[in-house]
Amino acid sequence: DVKVTQSSRYLVKRTGEKVFLECVQDMDHENMFWYRQDPGLGLRLIYFSYDVKMKEKGDIPEGYSVSREKKERFSLILESASTNQTSMYLCASSLGVLETQYFGPGTRLLVL
Amino acid sequence: RKEVEQDPGPFNVPEGATVAFNCTYSNSASQSFFWYRQDCRKEPKLLMSVYSSGNEDGRFTAQLNRASQYISLLIRDSKLSDSATYLCVVIPGYSSASKIIFGSGTRLSIRP
């Protein structure tokens, strides 16, 4: 069974703080993704990575950066958290670009 | 027009009923299509892929209509446990992983 884990289920941060969200997958998948999910807007792709140290912007990369130093780990960084970044953050991985994505349980981030 | 559109619902149907919903997409070059299921406060999980020839998995049937640019999901003999939000996913092509698009989801509620 594919397992995707995220470092926190719930996180509360203050405006201006630097926030790290970690994601780890154990299936040797090439591709990893970060999404945010908001009511009425569905899932929106922030960044994805198709290999170690490789990344590509998704639809809403502003205010975020990512890091993929190892194949199994993909980190999302909020350099200076803002209240409009309060959301559910979901990490996913897939073997191929056109293949099934497996999601982590999500991190609910509240920025005060 | 949104790139991927779904009727948000909710669809409220009695147990045992047949229910169907569609997902329309605007990019005619789209290559891959999926249906995911998301339970309340949980991560999305793959329900089924959608092939050109259509596919069936038990009570669930997915179809693709390229001419009219939509995919459909049919659930027969609905169960209480089918209550969830159903997300469609459209992937434009091999070089477009950054353009993976999730629909906002259709909420389905099965009543006893």
Image: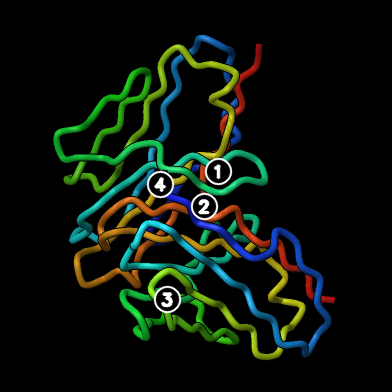
Q: Give the residue drawn at x 34%, y 62%.
A: A28
Report helix, strand or loop for mark 2. Answer: loop
Give the position of the N terminus of chain B as an image quadrant: bottom left
* Cα separation between marks 1 and 3: 24 Å
Q: Mark 1 points at which residue?
A: B8
Q: Is mark 4 on a helix, strand or loop?
A: strand
Q: How far apart are marks 4 and 2 (CA)?
A: 8 Å
Q: Are marks 1 and 2 in contact (CB under 8 Å)?
A: yes
Query: Between disc 1 and disc 2, whose residue precedes?
Result: 1
Whichever of labels 1 and 4 marks the residue nearer the N terminus, that label is 1
Callouts 1 and 4 on one subunit: yes
Q: What residue type is labelled 2?
A: Ser
Q: Residue at x 38, y 42 (%)?
A: B35
Place of residue A71 in the rendered image (x, y in percent of width and height, measured from the top left): 38, 73
Q: Of circles 2 and 3, which is in front?
A: 3
Of labels 1 and 2, the one closer to you: 2
Which chain letter matches label 2?
Answer: B
Determine the image quadrant of residue A79.
bottom right
Q: Is mark 1 on a helix, strand or loop?
A: loop
